[in-house]
Image: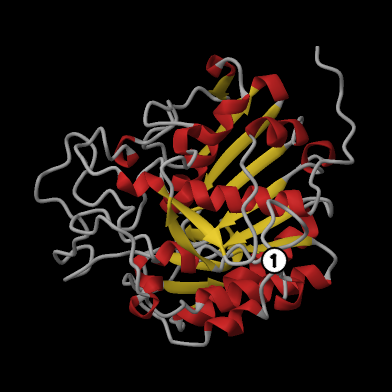
Amino acid sequence: MKKESTWALYFLLLLLTSIFLFNFVYPFDRQFLSRFAFLSSSYFAHKKSPFIGPCDYSRGHWVWDETYPHRLYDENCPFLDPGFRCHQNGRKNETFRKWRWQPDDCDIPRFNASVLLERNRNGRIVFAGDSVGRNQWESFLCMLTQGVSNLSKIYEVNGNPISKHKGYLVMRFEEYNMTVEYYRTPFLCVIGRPPLNLSNNVRRTIRLDELHWRNYFQEGGRVNMMNVKEAFRRSLQTWKSWALHNLDSRSSVFFRSFSPVHFRNGTWNDGGRCDKQTEPENDPTKLETEPYHNIFISGVVKQMQYESRKAHFLNITYLSEFRKDGHPSRFREPGTPPDAPQDCSHWCLPGVPDTWNELLYAQLLSEKFGTNKKFPERG
């Protein structure tokens, strides 16, 4: 990776939301997590303000707001997957678009696409993760369109169609000479063939020492079964090592926390549903316990901060847990069989992932991202 193309990079690591990982949870005090997060509680603002220093944006509540600016884009945005266009797919109830996240101690600064684009001129933004990561990437693309005068100046550099494309996608914003990229890596590490002379029962391995329902985990030439929590922890260490040795020290790294699912009366492949959920949850005691992933993620963030890196924990789990109403459910893309499982893990767009990106924007403002950058004159 060339130095001149990496100095402005901020890397959004959108972590695993695979169902097999979500099932392995244990309870703990939510306040415990705040001690590992990118800001300690002693820094939290005590007075509400659009933006005065750091704030714990992850703690708050959803408020009804008819004027909430989801008008940043609509379902006609050309970068949305058909499966996320819930209204076009038959959902009549659109109240899910009018809930705004309100942090307890401050206000979220309004997302300004032009400011973000200008501050990242000549740079790269990279999302890496699974299909929920793609969900957020598409939201981010659509939010940025408001800062571009001509949508034809946004295109995939290799001419690939972005709908249902699996792999690596690079969207160029020609006016700003910048890219917003998506790298599909559901397990963080490489999934590949096992070493030779191994049992025929082992058809693939997750290589914990290399980037990119029962699985065998491989380190070097050795393959074994491993506790999934330990495998996840090791994969994070592999990614941290890669980031410390390959990313420019001026890059900003964001680890997004776990995105919750809301299947009711069954799992995703066992009749689970969420189509009756049309309002956010209003009782915090009914929320799921915090997934163990978040403790591991926040720990890795702290380790990177000790290395003087701009690493942040983008904690969206708690706020997203309330939004049982925000999934496509049975309103899936045209051509989906009527008896297909409901989608209670991805999110309708516009919708909840827009808030994740607003928090991302707020955290970038807090570190004054791009303010010392020298911009070339427009040609």
In percent of width and height, residue 313 lies at 64, 65
- Residue assigned mark 1: 240
User: What residue is drawn where x is 43% and y is 81%?
Assistant: 225
Which quadrant: the C terminus? top right
The amino acid beneath tag 1 is Lys
Q: Quadrant of residue 239?
A: bottom right
User: What residue is drawn where x is 67% and y is 81%?
Assistant: 35
User: What residue is drawn where x is 83% and y is 69%?
Assistant: 307
Q: Quadrant of residue 103?
A: bottom right
Q: Is 249 on the left-hand or right-hand side of 239?
A: right
- Residue at the farthest left position: 339
Does 170 sit above or below residue 32?
above
Please state which of residues 350 and 210 is positioned toward the viewer in this rendering.
350
Number of callouts in the render?
1
User: What residue is drawn where x is 69% and y is 66%?
Assistant: 240
Can residue 222 be seen here? The reply is no
Can residue 322 be seen here? The reply is yes
Under circle 1, the secondary element is helix
In percent of width and height, residue 110 lies at 62, 43
Which quadrant: the N terminus? top right
